[in-house]
Image (cartoon, rainbow, N blue to C red):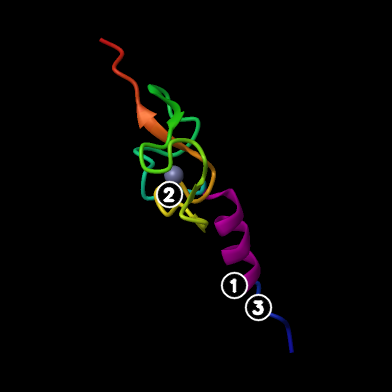
């Protein structure tokens, strides 16, 4: 019996999918966006000892930059 590659393909898609945190306005690398200090944890990545949910514990969020 041949093993299906369905799960493998799913893993690959998950791997290339950029991690988007609740505080991110766009995927990292998107033109017109940039990293900014998380407004909730102020760059610490933690709030009261728990990982910040807004930035996913990274301390930074991706925000749209006003280009005009
Ligand atoms: Zn945060």
Q: Is residue 23 left or right of residue 4?
A: left
State the residue position of label 2. 21
State the residue position of label 1. 6
At 42% from the left and 37% from the top, the residue drawn is: 38
Circle nearer the N terminus (3, 2): 3
Q: What element carries label 3?
A: loop
Q: Do the residues labelled 3 and 1 touch (CB within 8 Å)?
A: yes
- The label number, if any, that marks residue 4 in the structure image: 3
Bin the neighbour count of mark 3 within 10 Å (Cα to Cα): few under 14, some 14-19, many 20 and up.
few
Q: Judge whether 38 appears above or below 2 on screen.
A: above
Q: Point out residue 36 in the picture as x, y percentages from the top left corner.
A: 43, 28
Bin the neighbour count of mark 1 within 10 Å (Cα to Cα): few under 14, some 14-19, many 20 and up.
few
Q: Point out residue 46 in the picture as x, y percentages from the top left corner.
A: 50, 49
Dividing the image into 4 quarters, which one contains the C terminus?
A: top left
Q: What element carries label 2?
A: loop
The Cα–Cα distance between marks 3 and 1, rounded to whole angstroms, is 5 Å
At 61% from the left and 64% from the top, the residue drawn is: 11
* Label 1 CB less than 8 angstroms from ligand 1: no
Please report the bounds of the magenta region as a residue range. 6-17
**Mark in the foreground, 3 or 2:** 2
Circle nearer the N terminus (2, 1): 1
At 37% from the left and 31% from the top, the residue drawn is: 63
* Label 3 CB less than 8 angstroms from ligand 1: no
């Amino acid at each position: 019996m041949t093993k299906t590659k369905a799960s493998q393909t799913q893993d690959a898609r998950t791997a290339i999918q950029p991690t988007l945190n609740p505080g991110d306005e766009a995927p990292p690398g998107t033109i017109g966006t940039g990293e900014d200090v998380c407004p909730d944890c102020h760059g610490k990545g933690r709030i009261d000892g728990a990982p910040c949910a807004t930035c996913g514990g990274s301390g930074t969020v991706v925000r749209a930059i006003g280009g005009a």
